[in-house]
Amino acid sequence: MLVHIDGPWSPLLGRLALSEIPYNNPILVGTFVFAALLAVILVGLVTYLGLWRTIWRDWLTSVDHKKIGIMYILIGLVMLFRGFMDAVMMRAQQAMADGPHSAGYMDSPHGYLTPYHFDQIYTAHGTIMILFAATPLLVGIMNILVPLQIGARDMAYPYLNAVSLWLTAAGAALVMASLFIGDFAHAGWFGIVPVMELPYSPGVGVDYWMWAFQLSSIGTTLGGINLLATIVKMRAPGMTWGRLPIFTWASLSANLISLSTFPVLSVALALLALDRYLGTHFYTAGLGGNLMLYNDLFWIWGHPEVYFVILPAFGMISEIIPTFSEKPLFGYLGMVLASLGIAGVSWGVWLHHFFTMAASPAVNAFFSITTMAVGIPTGVKVFNWAFTMFRGRLRFELPMMWASAALFYLLVGGLTGMMNAFTTNDYMVHNSVFVVAHFHMMLLLIVYAIFGGVNYWFPKVFGFRLEQRFGKIFFWLFTAGTAVVFIPMFTLGFMGMTRRLAYVAFPQWRPLLDIEVVGIVIYLLSAVFLVAQLYVSFRDRAQNRAGLDAWETSRSLEWMTHSPVPFYNFAVTPEVHARDERAWRVEHGVDTVRPERYEDIHMPRNTAIPLWLGALSFGLAFGLVWRMWWLTEVCGLAIFALIVIRSFDRDTDYTIPAADIERMERAIRDVPSGRPVVAGVRGAVPAFRQGV
Amino acid sequence: MLDPRGVISVTQDHYLALDVLIMLLIIVPTGIFIVWAMRHYRRDGGRGRHDARWDHSYALEALVWGIPILTVGVLSYYSVKAIYAVNPYHPTIMARATHAKGPLDIDVISTDWQWVFIYPQQGIATVNRLVIPKGVPVHFRLTSATVVNDFYIPQLVGMIDVMPAMRVRQTLLASRTGTYEGYSANFSGAGFSWMNFETQAVSRSAFRAWVARVQGAPTHLSYTAFDQVAQPTINIHGRVAYFSQVQPGLFRHVVAQTAAGKTYPTPMAMTENMTRYLKAQARRDAHNRD
């Protein structure tokens, strides 16, 4: 039944042996020492500050949507750093391994990385940036904001929300584990078949990739269900569809995509698993396998996934620009239709990822036109943002800087996107670094929106604003780095340079590759200022305390509750009167009215089960990767048992009496203005500590 | 790529320029408008009048939707036209031009990680070197013995997937003599970065002389010999080989073998230590020569 694999195997450790630990690779040993030191410092610090109890009770076992969102964002940031270091290594390798006379170090014929190692790095870079950086960052932001924007107490399924988080965390952990135990896939983040099949990838790398993807895919599907249910069912009274904040509309569109496409990804990966474990022939070259089946299934998820990450980014830009233009968003209805339009079109464009497969002209023509059609709603969005600024009163504070810069990325990305959608152009640049530069423009747009969004909503979540001076230096350095890396990359694409080269055969490309290295160094430098910004903000948090409305011209519902938001979100569920409720209340002078009386609030209880499910899923996947069947069986059974036990648990919620709400509300109001109010940090107001 | 030397690549560049021009017509004014609005309406020192209620205008919204729809419409028209013009199976752009000489057939087989070019009419084959006559349409049939590659000669023709157990076609016509770089564009494993083949477009008489020379090559290409060539090889030194007396129907046989499950597994050794693997490869090459 099981495929026979050459090489040693033992019942206890499966394929795992001491030789699988890359102790002889100085790069990985260095990374391990760095990671281990960091872990020791962190553990020591937490122990010294006596925070273990807080971390366990207030964070790891929490079902609070805001805390889950923050933890998603933390995972995203850690993985963003990892993915960025991968990028640094790739740039260095290509600059060093250029031309037949370039020197080679550490067993490599050219440069310092062997092709096999280089291939793993770019695969990890793509996988991490898309699935474990962009997706968790955006899911985290949606998690925090959507319930606040619609006036809900929490997500529709708080427990499920925690399960999604810990499944994603397990996937991320699996990717990280592959650094130090065994190796990672080498066939690209989207998995090239039949390179992914056993004859061409006999190691455990593809298995790591496959199960990490699978865990994250299941987690995101569950998260999609949750957000959709929340938006449809949990809106505050008066929050009609026509009054829904635009970010929530974007989240709704995004999660329609995730719910309808992530299951396809799960199936595509499951079939690959059958090929690799049971010896079936779904995607093999011969014996009836069809490798195009994989391409179809993967990209039916893969392209909508791009819009799954870009729609929330568009949503954030749509929230930031009106606030700092001091006027409502132009063309609300058009924006909503455009968001849904992007979601709709996303299902019909996947084939442009393999235009070069020699399909008939009619097929290519159809997908060329559908792909171009994406330009219609996207163009509408750009124009609407421009007209939102038109007749506005613009303040270029940090969030606005990031958001308005993102517009220019959309222009460049749109131009190059239209070039790629034009099928015959695609024949020329399909697998070249031109395409790589294009999709980095689009993903950097998302990054800009995320940085804008983080600066914008940070005071809402933590109660103090981020420092601006270092933040602006970070912005300008980051922008400079982008220009210096990607303008040469577009040029190289036109010169015919293809993707994924561990060795560059043409020395005339060397100067441009060197410029790209300069760019990546600027990026590295910018990261220093990001850290400085965060440090200074935290140090001076008392001076930067934010009130209800940190920017004074905000428009939507989330700015009507305290900063930081108490765990029950709103003391009294707000009644919604207008599209921009906060702006409406300010205009009508009712923004400071206190509720006449408080009511009991019904809240979900914390639980450690999602954390255990995540840990067990990691064990299950790890067992599968190394073919340690006992580990897989034990973890699988334990997961099943936990789910059954949880389903019989009736004590999953509690009620906060109205009197307690009143007391906590008064405590928050009476906080001396200089005192820091920080979630989970010493000195936080008692109201932030969720009841157990 | 911006210095095209073939009918197909010239056409592709022509449409590329058209596409970019149309897009710039939209994007440049939009960019200028955004920059103008950002300056004119800024709070500190901007001259624009603030209107806190203005969020809707039917005329503008018609424009906002109209411009992208129109642009996409125009671009779609040209895109479809271009797709038919350079369709790899039957490029209309080449059907229109009449050619005195009939097409030259070349069968392309990609292996891990080399290119085998078979000239069935001439009964010869080359590895990692493509020689074509100038001004004659060349019809390719392409397949792979192992995994997917992309056949790509930037100055002559765009990419096409070369897939195992499947056969695709590509067409090109070099309008000038010269040496052009060709390579695989689709990642195919550890030796991918070295999958280059030099393409020489020569005059018709030089091509005939070259064919005659290769027909005298001492090594022959039967399926057994092909099997040796197709063993995983990282062509790090850019080796080229020539064969005469190619077994008839070799291309079809390779497609059929791959469809029947023939693979050339990547050895585990390759995944560990590059230098050791390259030494083993050199030993194998020496053994084959003996």
Image (cartoon, rainbow, N blue to C red):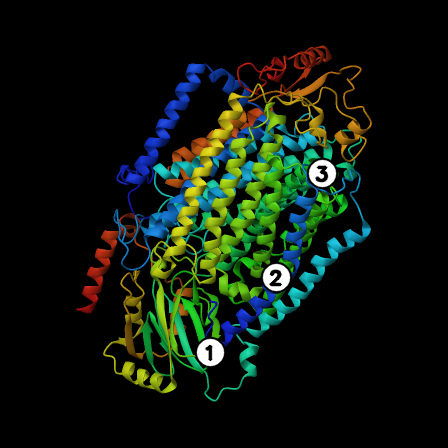
Residue holding disc 3 = A393
In front: label 3 or label 2: 3
Badge 3 vs badge 2, beta-carbon distance below 8 Å: no
The reply to whether dot 1 and dot 2 touch (C-beta < 8 Å) is: no
Residue, disc 1: B173
Describe residue A494's horizontal placement relative to residue A563 as left or right: left
Q: Under tag 2, what secondary structure?
A: helix
Q: Amino acid at mark 1?
A: Leu
Q: Is residue B274 above or below residue B52?
A: below
Q: Chain of mark 3?
A: A
Q: Position of residue A2 (x, y in %)?
A: 39, 47
Three-letter amino acid code of the residue under disc 3 = Arg
Amino acid at circle 2: Phe
Residues at circles 1 and 3 in contact by the CB criterion of under 8 Å? no
How many C-alpha atoms fall within 10 Å of the one at disc 2: few (<14), some, or many (≥20)? many
Both marks 3 and 2 on one chain: yes
Decide: few, some or many residues near mark 1? Use Cα within 10 Å; few <14, some 14-19, many ≥20.
many
Alpha-carbon span between mark 1 and mark 3:
59 Å
| Whether residue A244 is visible | yes
Query: Looking at the picture, does residue B269 appear above or below residue A505?
Result: above
| For marks 3 and 2 on the same chain, the one whose residue lies earlier in the sequence | 2
- Write down the residue under mark 2: A367
Point 55% across, 40% down: residue: A135
* Relative depth, front residue between A63 and A478: A478
Q: Nearer the viewer, mark 1 or mark 3?
A: 3
Q: Position of residue A501 (x, y in %)?
A: 38, 55
Q: Chain of mark 2?
A: A
Q: Is residue A627 visible?
A: no
